Amino acid sequence: MLKQVARYFQFNERQTNFRQETIAGMTTFLALAYILVVNPAVLGEAGMDKGAVFTATALTILFGTLMIGLFANYPIGIAPSMGLNAFFTYGVVQSLGVEWQVALTGVFIAAILFMILSLLKIREKIINAIPQDLKHAVAGGIGFFIAFIGLKNAGLVTSSQSTFVQLGDLTTPTTLLAIFAFIITIIMLVMGWRGAIFYGIILATISGVLLGVIDKPNQIIGKVPSLEPTFLVALQPENLTQALSPQVLPVIFTFLFVAFFDTAGTLIAIASQAGLIRNNEVPNAGRALLSDSTASTVGALLGTSTTASMIESSAGIGAGGRTGFTSVVMSAFFAAALFFEPILSIVPTSVTAPALIIVGAMMATEVKQINWDSLDVAIPAFITIIMMPLTFSVATGIALGFILYPITFLSAKRGKDIHPMMYVLFVLFIIYFWISP
């Protein structure tokens, strides 16, 4: 049985084993677990029932992650996008005055369009048409982006009215705990411990509990909240009618656009980090993208915002994850999390933050593959990289870089080197910036 599993997930070809994949799955679970707490809190501000959103979030992650692991053999976690849930609540419901039921229907419609594009393999063709230099730029840019998220979550970087960002208060207990986790993790990592990231999270959590920085859970097992308040709300006829109104259509396009390129960017980065890209093509990209779009559809029906392949999955890659078995392990933990929410909640983002910083550093090494000696390549690549952390959006960095790419190549009289799909993306990105709410 174990040999069949190893053969199915191509352990030998990808130079991995059960122990390595299991540790990677646990590591990514811990890096992603905060979503089970944060997503209900964010969508709750839109008026949604937090308990129902918690259950919908856990079930959606379980379904999507299991599908991409079994169907596409990728070590990726699929979960509600932390950027799109904020857009759902603050940009759509609170700013535009759209009811959450209608906004959820908009998520569902965007997910269906997602699935159609995936089934027609349009998404896969677009990804494979992206030049190698820009793929390296996307991977490196996401590295800087997730490192910035990690620094923010750790409290090492905070906002500032005068300088936008500044060094945080290094004396706060949670920040000190994050620093401890970071140092102990990099020591183990440099010493060659393959599970260093996972062990760092565990040691920091135990230390936090012993020192009183992390609260002990009140109970071990909790009751699974009911889905009833959000289940199938997206299919109600009155919500479907309102979702197709001129006011909501740009919102649907935004859900579609951001999820499309967030996922594409993450898939490229993860495949590159895991050493899976061959001949400038991402293997099984169509299956991976279909898994993501199907998860978005299921999530909308259950009661959560648009999903995406999560950049935190890179934590598991850093711990040695190379196959879909990592995702299977991850799914098992999220299934258990439905019943162990009190235990799950004790691991704060300050403890998982160092994993993002370290993996961000690993991913940033992708920039060395870019042809920096050619300005027509270097400038779009640089803009792609720098704008991801500065705009706090993977999709925006990709959009700006991809708009510049045809311009610089045409200026250098290298138009024949541009894939026709890049011109299509050039137009679509400009339209996106023009009509985005």
Image (spheres, rainbow, N blue to C red):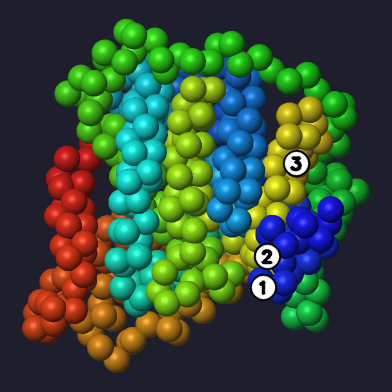
Who comes first in sequence, dot 3 or dot 2? 2
Q: What residue sits right under mark 2 in the picture?
A: 10
Left or right: 432, with 212 as reference point: left
- Do the CB atoms of the residues marked 1 and 2 lie less than 8 Å apart? yes
Who comes first in sequence, dot 3 or dot 1? 1
Q: Quadrant of the C terminus?
A: top left
Q: Residue furthest right?
A: 210
Q: Is residue 224 above or below residue 131?
A: above
User: Where's residue 109, x and y in %?
Assistant: 34, 28
Q: Secondary structure at mark 3?
A: helix
Q: Is residue 92 above or below residue 395?
A: above
Q: What residue sits right under mark 1 in the picture?
A: 13
User: Where's residue 42, x and y in %?
Assistant: 51, 31
Looking at the rendered structure, the number of numbered marks drawn on it comes to 3
Q: Residue at x 20, y 24 (%)?
A: 247
Q: What residue sits right under mark 3 in the picture?
A: 332
Q: Residues within 10 Å of mark 3 (few under 14, many from 20)?
A: some
Task: Using the rendered view, name the quadrant where residue 95 is placed.
Answer: top left
Q: Secondary structure at mark 1?
A: loop
Q: Residue at x 26, y 13 (%)?
A: 241
Q: CA distance from mark 1 to mark 2?
A: 5 Å
Q: Residues within 10 Å of mark 2 (few under 14, many from 20)?
A: some
Q: Nearer the viewer, residue 131 or 354?
A: 131
- Do the CB atoms of the residues marked 3 and 2 lie less than 8 Å apart? no
Residue type beneath disc 3: Ala
Left or right: 18, with 29 as reference point: right
Front tag of 3 and 1: 1
Residue 374 visible from this viewpoint: yes
User: Where's residue 287, x and y in %?
Assistant: 48, 51
Q: CA distance from mark 3 to mark 2?
A: 20 Å
